[in-house]
Amino acid sequence: MTQKFARESYTIMNELVLPNDTNTLNNLMGGRLLHWMDIAAAISAQKHCNRIVVTASVDNVSFKHPVKLGDVISIEAQVTRAFNTSVEVRLVVSAQNIPSGTKVRSNEAFYTFVAIDQNGRTIAVPQLIPETDEEKKLYNEALQRRELRLVLGGKLKPKDAKELQNLFKEVVRE
């Protein structure tokens, strides 16, 4: 199986928030942002997998700051871990008001994608090699996030979620 560095999947996507993207308060509609995030994450996942990928899950997306009409959205995406046939992608979204020079982080999320072959069947993906301290931290924590997704999706029983159990044991000790 091949291996790839996390940095090879790094993707940045920019979008200008136009009137058609906003609600009646002139704020970016959440659904539009989720659409853009899905595209950026898919590009990142495809860079890693060299395959077509499909969205398998979207973790909690919290809207920390409203994004206004005329702001420029920057979506940074990078694969944090590869499993057998899936990859986890971290997204960080910033909103910049160019005339005022302000920039705020508006969202952060993790998306999971599954690689598929030309017949629509899942296919193995390259392993991920984290290099920086931040990449290594995200890589190591990905097992807990994966188990949580599987438990919430009904694909793993809580009693079988060993990484989550270890996390809660650490929290109780502190």
Image: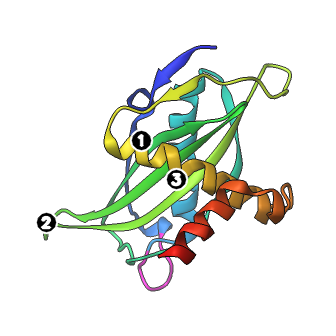
Left or right, 80 with reference to 54:
left
Residue 24's x, y, as percent?
Answer: 49, 84
Task: Give me the C-alpha separation between circle 3 and circle 1.
Answer: 23 Å
Label placed on residue 161: none
Q: Residue 16 location, x and y as percent?
A: 35, 57
Q: How crowded is mark 1: few (under 14 residues within 10 Å), some or many (20 or more)?
A: some
Identify residue type, mark 3. Answer: Met
Q: Residues within 10 Å of mark 3 (few under 14, many from 20)?
A: many
- Identity of the residue drawn at 66% across and 24% down: 125
* Residue nearest the viewer, comparing 72 with 2: 2
Residue 7, quarter of picture? top left
Query: Contact, CB < 8 Å: mark 2 with mark 1?
Result: no
Rendered location of residue 111, percent (x, y):
60, 51
User: Is the residue marked by circle 2 packed among few (<14), some (14-19), or many (20+) residues within 10 Å?
Assistant: few
Disc number lying in front (3 or 1): 1
State which region is magenta.
22-27
Q: Does the stretch in magenta take in 66?
A: no
The residue to which callout 1 is attached is 136
Residue farthest front in this picture: 173
Looking at the image, which residue is at 86% across and 21% down? Answer: 119
Q: Assess whether residue 26 is covered by the magenta stretch.
A: yes
Q: Distance between the residues labelled 2 and 1?
A: 32 Å
Real-space CA distance between mark 2 and mark 3, rounded to the nearest whole angstrom: 23 Å
Residue 46 x %, y %? 58, 29
Residue 168 located left or right of residue 7: right
Mark 2: which secondary structure?
Answer: loop
Q: Which circle's residue, 2 or 3, is located before the other in the chain?
A: 3
Mark 2 lies on residue: 101
Residue 37 is labelled as: 3
Closer to the camera in the image, 39 or 144: 144
